[in-house]
Image (cartoon, grey):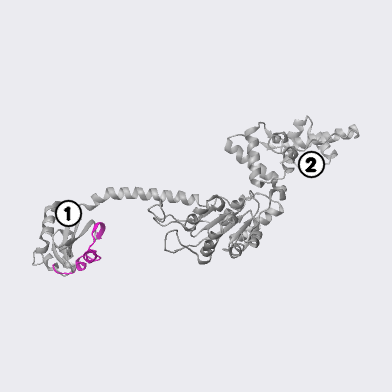
Amino acid sequence: MQTERVEPFAAARALMVMIDEMIDGAILVDKDARIVWSNDKHVWFSDQRMAMLGFRSAADAIGQPVERLIPHSRMREVVESGRSLPLDIMRYGEHTLLVSRLPLRDEGGAVIGALAFALKNSLTYLRPIADRFNKLQSRLTRVEQELAASRASQYTVENLIGFSPAMLQVKRLVRRAGQILSAVLLLGETGTGKELVAQSIHASSDRAHRPFVAVNTAAIPENLLEAEFFGVAPGAYTGAGRQARPGKFQLAHGGTLFLDEIGDMPLPLQAKLLRALQEREVEPLGSNQIVKVDVRIIAATSRPLADMVRSGAFRSDLYYRLNVFPIQLPALRERKDDLEILATRFSEKIALGLDQPMREFTPAALDALRHHDWPGNVRELANIVEQVYVRTEGDRITAEDFADILPNAAIPSPAAPDRRRPLSTAMDELERGLILEALRETQGNKLEAARNLGLSRTNLYAKLRKHGIPAQPDD
């Protein structure tokens, strides 16, 4: 097809003729995006396509807007912008084409039209690219899944161990906090399990399947806090990456952001945090763009925030924003009823981690733990139990195992015998103690306890009645 329109495009047409074996269709348009030439390849100018458009032949398409022949064509975009689209995947009828679009210019640099051509056997050319893309996509999906799993909460209310009145109250408040969207403030000494409680609240909420992101304010240098919270724009400062780095607010979008040790946050950042909470938006460092965020806040501190507000060390407006649903976590010395079950749970976990048999606590060992004041709370108890496992040996954990680990005052000295007691009374007390120990070792199995004591089952029951020990039936 040749018309008076073709001459300005002679060089482009000659090039298409030279690479005819490599292409599966080529088309030229002028600066008004009207068709001026095609290489007659069937991909665009099939007889069926021409008839459907009301053309008797391909020649009738010359001078027509390119969109009439190729709906959704981007050729007009190329001639109007002067920018090339060197690689694009295009669907045309039943064909999938790998298309290049280039602007054509005159000697003065003005755009006079555009050229588009499709590579022959496009699917063959596309397959290696598609295969690599699919592999990268699979890898990205896997990394996103792993990242999502790492940001999911690991604990639920069931992981809050203890049945003391103080812990039952904490569990009740945690379940309530999971049903609301208001900010939660966790108060308590270091080592009382504030992050575990925060994760339990998240797991109890309707955001449980969204990210849980934790940040320890005290562990981040003051000059990096703003970037950690709000993110960094590309090239925001010397050494900044070329790509934007999201902050904790963006990472927690749709989920929960846990701000640990909030009392250590410097005053300038407190103002920016308050604005982020009120407006539900953040401005990355070095950027003028506002990013909307949907984040549920759980804050925690071991410091007396109310006193800090009075002294001016903590903003009162931020304090009131965070202190909507406070939960006071009890110290371990205030819930010693839970000490045995906590110590046993740590013993199970540590034995598993060290690939050792689990060691039970003797009554004297538990008494030694109860006499300790636990300034480090639950975290200190976990550390003490682990030290016992790595520093001592034996089938059970005894009071003597704590001799070099706990302060001496924590290990009760054995009571001096009362020499004024009758021998029969002392013998009865000894016998009663031996029977109770045998029952503990056999987990209440009377028949096995009797064998260990060298007694018949009948004699054992008689002694149980004598010493006032409940005789429940064997399991």
Q: Is residue 185 visible in this depiction of the protein?
A: yes
Residue under label 1: 23
Q: Is residue 18 above or below residue 59?
A: above
Residue under label 2: 471
4 left or right, relative to 246: left
Q: What range is drawn magenta here?
A: 62-91
Q: Is residue 206 visible in this depiction of the protein?
A: no
Q: Nearer the viewer, residue 390 or 462?
A: 390
Residue found 79% across the figure and 32% down from its top? 456
Task: State yes or no: residue 403 in magenta.
Answer: no
The single residue placed furthest to the top in the displayed view is 454
Q: CA distance from mark 2 to mark 1?
A: 95 Å
Disc 2 is placed on an element classified as loop
Residue type, numbered disc 1: Ile
Q: Residues within 10 Å of mark 1 (few under 14, many from 20)?
A: some
Q: Is residue 432 above or below residue 274?
A: above
